[in-house]
Image: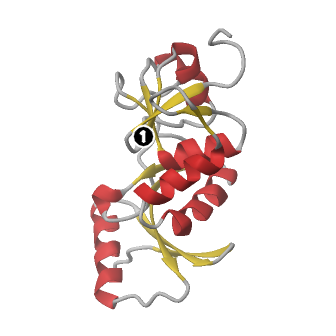
Amino acid sequence: MTEQQGKPKGVLIGSKVVVFGRDDAKRVFSLGFFGKPLSVRKPKSPEEVEPPLELSLIEATYLCENGELEVSSPDGGELNCENLKKIATEHIREFGLIYPVYIRLRKAGLVIRSALKYGADFALYREAPGKEHAPYLLKVLESTQSVDPGDLVGWGRVAHSVRKDLIIAISYGSRQSFIVFKWLRP
């Protein structure tokens, strides 16, 4: 089977899935700005993408579950979506909490990137990285989780300092509520 036929293919390497084929990398990226090409910092279109394309375990799981990606282990054995989800759960401490939020936001048409460097779970884009700066940082909390007011202020200050609005996603199992915080000056 050539690279053009069938689903794009990725290989699990540590805590990432890497797409090595040129056409596969362009195809995966074109599905909604998935992954980060290691050769271009913030490509604006799939034409700029050159392999390898690095996908997070969250992105790879989402693409697998949507029938858009096949993933194999480094030894060449195929991983099904449930195996991939189990691996993601082992590598990402709160995968079960944040993944349903990721799915909902992706289905709403947002492009999502990790925002760990900001102390948040996700940076959200209406268009795409490279086309705009992320207008939102998102932090996911469980409905039963208590929040220290200092943490809330801290997340808001970080979001404001990088010119983003803060969104708190509150997870109630399979449902979520969203609260947007904006920094206001009196």
Does 123 appear above or below 148? above
Q: Residue furthest top?
A: 2
User: Residue at left 45%, top 49%?
Assistant: 113
Visible residue check, residue 186: no
Q: Which element carries disc 1, helix, strand or loop?
A: strand
Residue 180 coordinates in the image, percent (x, y): 51, 73
Residue 183 coordinates in the image, percent (x, y): 38, 74
User: Residue at left 38%, top 64%?
Assistant: 120
Q: Name the image colouring.
A: secondary structure
Left or right: 90 in relation to 33: left
Does 29 appear above or below 134? above
Residue 115 coordinates in the image, percent (x, y): 37, 56
Tag count: 1
The quadrant the C terminus occupies is: bottom left
57 or 29, nearer to the observer: 57
80 or 6, nearer to the observer: 80
Does 21 appear above or below 141? above
Residue 20 coordinates in the image, percent (x, y): 47, 20
Dividing the picture into quadrants, the one containing residue 32 is: top right
Dividing the picture into quadrants, the one containing residue 150 is: bottom left
115 or 130, nearer to the observer: 115
Q: Which residue is mark 1?
A: 16
Q: Residues within 10 Å of mark 1 (few under 14, many from 20)?
A: many
The quadrant the N terminus occupies is: top right
User: Residue at left 55%, top 42%?
Assistant: 60
Which residue type does callout 1 highlight? Lys
Dividing the picture into quadrants, the one containing residue 103 is: bottom right
Left or right: 155 in relation to 60: left
Does 150 appear above or below 154? below
Visible residue check, residue 171: yes
